[in-house]
Image: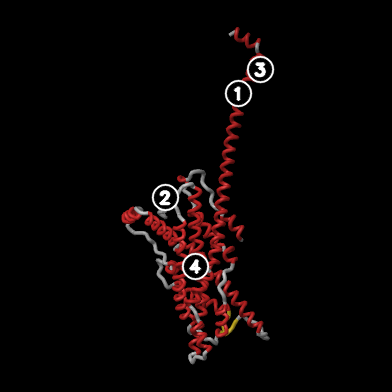
Amino acid sequence: MSFVAKFGKRHKKKLIFSAILFGGGYATVKYSIHRFKKALLMSSEDADLVNKQYEKSQKLQHYYTIKKTSDEAIRGLLKSIENQISIALSSDEYLEQLKHKAPNKLELWEKIKISSISKCLSTIYSLTISTILIKVQLNIIGGYLFKSSSSESTFLNFEKSLISEEKLSPNIQKKYLENIEIFVSEGIPKLCAQVKNCVVCVFEKLSLKENIDIAYFNEKLESVRENVEALNGKEINFINELLNLRPNKPKDKEINEIILAEKKNSENNDEGILLDNLNNETFDLVQSDDFIQTFCSIFDSYKNEFLNNLSSLILKQKIDKNESEKISLSLPLAKLIPILNQMKLTCDFNILENNLKLNIFSSNIYEAFCYVPEDRRNSDPLSGIDVNMILKSLI
């Protein structure tokens, strides 16, 4: 012990210096390794963050493309909708008879009354249904296409949709979007007939001499609306009836699996399965509470636009006639009918851009159908569309 103590005392400074040197070196190496690992981790996190932001930007850009396409498609349908309504509810024959001084003049005016009011209300319904149907279908397709491209694979398997391991080809997209054409060519005439019957019930006993203001006319339109929407049963609402959408889901699960297995034997039947399931997805959405709420919001927007235009035309007529009395937005029904007949089908751009429920409903559909489950993703989860960001830019 004495030798060790003497050695330690003799080389005390050297031992302290050596301890500091080796201890400091060890600490420096450990700290450097820690900083290096932290730098690598931060670099990886930064790269992931950049990737997520890029993916989010791509999704948002794709969503806006779908929105622009759907808005243009709605405007492109205006002429076809107007033609179908004009054919179904034409009053030209009655007007021609009036020109030739037909003896049943009052009866003809009654028919023109029903026809003109039915035409206006059918226009509002047709625009509303077309707007939401186009938004629903294009956002379903857009969501699936984005999911397919982002996952670098074909469709992922969903229990709900049964769309699996298939590509959404342009041919399938075209066939699916034919639902819109079917509504215009077949659904609108059916809608016009339903609306006309309900207009007869509400307006038939309303005298042509009765003074009508905008508020009272709106009340009558709402009465017609209640009758129209109460025509069909509870299981399938009147919109699905007009779209001719039917759920193609056998009740027995085993029978369903057998049918699907048999259908997968040929390419044509595979397309049929995809179309069936796309239509099933559409059917489910049309039956949802969100759809009904969005429908009511869009219907009210188009109806308010129609009533505003009607008010402007009434006011213009009164000003043109230089009426000296206090101007009021009311006319005898007989004078209101020609104004209703001359009103043209329009689609206000602001309704498509600024309707809150429509934008939320559309973005939710897109997000739902481009969602990639956590355990099936090839990379980090895609962040969802920032709905608040979308709405702020739209409002």
Viewer-closest of 203 and 53: 53
258 horizontally vs 144: left or right: left
Q: Tags 4 and 2 in contact by the CB under 8 Å rule?
A: no
Q: Secondary structure at mark 3?
A: helix
Report the mark closest to the observer, 3 or 2.
2
Q: Secondary structure at mark 1?
A: helix
Report the mark closest to the observer, 4 or 2.
2
22 horizontally vs 299: left or right: right
Question: What residue does disc 4 label?
Answer: 129
In primary-sequence order, the first of circles 1 and 4 is 1
Question: What residue does disc 3 label?
Answer: 17
Q: Position of residue 250 (x, y in %)?
A: 34, 59
Instruction: Look at the image and tell me whether residue 357 can be seen.
Output: no
Q: Quadrant of the N terminus?
A: top right
Instruction: Check residue 26 in the rendering and tell me which mark sits there, or answer none.
Output: 1
Of the residues shown, which amino acid type is indicated by label 4?
Ile
Of the residues shown, which amino acid type is indicated by label 3?
Phe
Q: Secondary structure at mark 4?
A: helix
Instruction: Check residue 165 in the rendering and tell me which mark sits there, or answer none.
Output: 2
Q: Tags 3 and 1 in contact by the CB under 8 Å rule?
A: no
In primary-sequence order, the first of circles 1 and 2 is 1
Between the residue at mark 3 and the residue at mark 2, the CA separation in whole angstroms equals 70 Å
